[in-house]
Amino acid sequence: MRRRTPIWLAALSVGLAALFAVPPAHAAAPAGRGPSLYVPDANPAAYQQVRSLARAGRLRDAAGILAMVNTPQAVWFGDQSPAEVERLVRAVVRDAGREHAVPALALYNIPGRDCANYSAGGAANTAEYQAWIDAVARGIGRGEAIVTLEPDALALLPSDCGQDDAQGTKTAARYAEVNYAVDALEPLRGTRVYLDTGHPGWQSVNSIVPRLIKGGVGRASGFYTNASNYNTDDANSWYGKLISSCLAYADGGGDVAECPNQWWSRADAQTWLDTHVTTPPSRMKHFVTDSSRNGRGTWTPPAGKYSDAQDWCNPPDRGLGARPTLRTGDPLQDARLWIKTPGESDGLCLRGTAGPEDPERGTVDPKAGDWFPQQVLELARLAEPPLLPGH
């Protein structure tokens, strides 16, 4: 169930809204325009930061953070027991249904998650994962949900990071687990499942399409890109179009190796698509994108400064991106979402140094998933488009 809003927060929200036109939380969709996306409860540390800023007289910063957390974003699930995840998912789906909203659920519990890096964890084995997915399915039930299934599950296979055996046992299990989740969740009446592609600066179209096919994308609604990353909306939409087109080409018997990828010139790629892909968008696989932190695009590390710049890990001076929507204007793009929870750390970023501080920030970054007040202020202040009037 949704937590009650503290009286102090409700009063502060009203005051800041009057001063800065902060959008109200959990707003219903305009009449006649269909469902909205769901606004979940924020990380409690967000409200603590808002309160501290307001007490210090930094009202505009407080209003910016409130506007950020009052924006629809995904609810993440991982590491809970089956009983717990079933209860939590059911609560979110029911709460969203009461508001005529669609929740985005990020499922993050695959065995070997994140190749045992900053976000290590997940189910212990395939059987445990299947039981967990079954619990998620029971929690969703007959409700509506957009499921972004297991970020990095296909773009970062066990075989990519030296965690597999010579027979490829763990990678084969990964594909079996993703397929199981597709078959358990996609048939639910109101659920759409999207599979991982990484982002356009990582896997090429030619390398990710075979993984999507092996992962069961043919039985899913489609795929997603840029989860927790910083690529621009333009780059993400183009990458999505190329992947959708290559999937359609492969479905007709074409060779994935022939497909144009994101590093072709766009003119040449478009000419190839016009010649080889005649499938209507309604019959192609659709996609969703993550615009949570891409307002200023990707970070370019200082040349030669770091042995491993970790450009994906809490990069400095990034901004929130375009607001989430179910009305993208692109026949292949079902939604633009905030998949990554903006304000939560990517992990302890050392950039190839001995640490313990992040050399780009001069601080010890919070562990993955913890609230990062310094980054929060950057994201809100540098949002593009701006969060508040007058920026």
Image (cartoon, grey):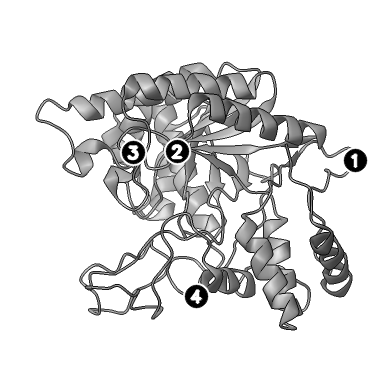
Q: Is residue 204 left or right of residue 194?
A: left
Q: Identify residue for label 2.
A: 108
Instruction: Answer whether residue 138 is visible to the viewer in this image.
Output: yes
Instruction: Answer whether residue 251 is visible to the viewer in this image.
Output: no
Kind of residue indicated by mark 1 = Ala
* Residue 138: quadrant of the picture: top right
Q: Position of residue 340 (x, y in %)?
A: 53, 51
Name the residue located 82 percent from the left edge and 48 percent from the top edge: 27
Q: Secondary structure at mark 2?
A: loop
Q: CA distance from mark 2 to mark 1?
A: 34 Å
- Label 3: few (<14), some (14–19) or many (≥20) C-alpha neighbours in 10 Å: many
Kind of residue indicated by mark 3 = Ile
Q: Is residue 312 left or right of residue 333?
A: left
Q: Work out whether 233 lies above or below 11.
A: above
Q: Which mark is residue 31?
A: 1
- Between tags 1 and 4, which lies in front? 4
Q: Position of residue 34 (x, y in %)?
A: 81, 36
Kind of residue indicated by mark 2 = Tyr
Q: Identify residue for label 4.
A: 317
